[in-house]
Image (cartoon, rainbow, N blue to C red):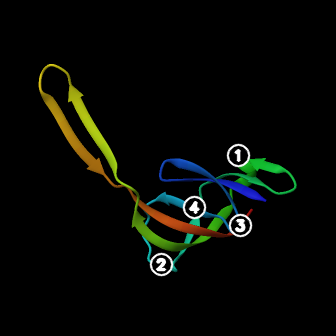
Amino acid sequence: MYAIIATGGKQYKVSEGDIIDIEKIEGESGAAVTFDQVLAVSGDTLKVAGDVAGATVTGTVMEQGKKRKVVVYRYKRKSGYHKKNGHRQLFTRVKIDKING
């Protein structure tokens, strides 16, 4: 059984027991989180759209952190222009406990 959820502007295919990294959400380690924006649920048959109106996915926050640094380097030839910038995206690691739907 799996579900497709939307959070942080992205979609994730999850099953019970999966560990996923999502965009940062509020909550400390061990806190419960509920995803109510479920797009599809697959059990015996695939249910989408209006069939999954009341479906939810629950999980537990495992940790909050930052991903690896991404270096952004801008350069224009012949003009001497270059600019180096870095970015570390915040994330939340979530363990999927149950798919209700």
Residue at the spot 41% in from the left edge and 58% down from the top edge: 67
Labels 1 and 3: the sequence-earlier one? 3
Mark 2 or mark 4: which comes first in sequence? 4
Q: Between marks 1 and 4, how big is the CA–CA gap?
A: 24 Å
Q: Nearer the viewer, mark 1 or mark 3?
A: 3
Q: CA distance from mark 2 to mark 3?
A: 19 Å
The residue type indicated by label 3 comes to Glu
**In whole angstroms, how far apart are the C-alphas of marks 2 and 1?**
32 Å
Q: What x and y, as percent, mark residue 69? A: 34, 53
**Position above or below: 48 against 98:** above
Residue underneath mark 1:
49
Q: Position of residue 93 (x, y in %)?
A: 51, 66
Residue under label 4, please give it.
20
**How many residues crowd mark 2 within 10 Å: few (<14), some (14–19), many (20+)?**
few
Relative placement, left or right, of 86 versus 43 is: left
Secondary element type, mark 1: helix
| Type of the residue with mark 2 | Ser
Earlier residue among tags 2 and 1: 2
Pick whichever of labels 2 and 3 is earlier in the sequence: 3
Residue located beneath label 2 in the image: 29
Mark toward the start of the polypeptide (1 vs 4): 4
Total tally of numbered discs in the picture: 4
What residue is shown at x 74% (from left), y 62% (from top)?
A: 101
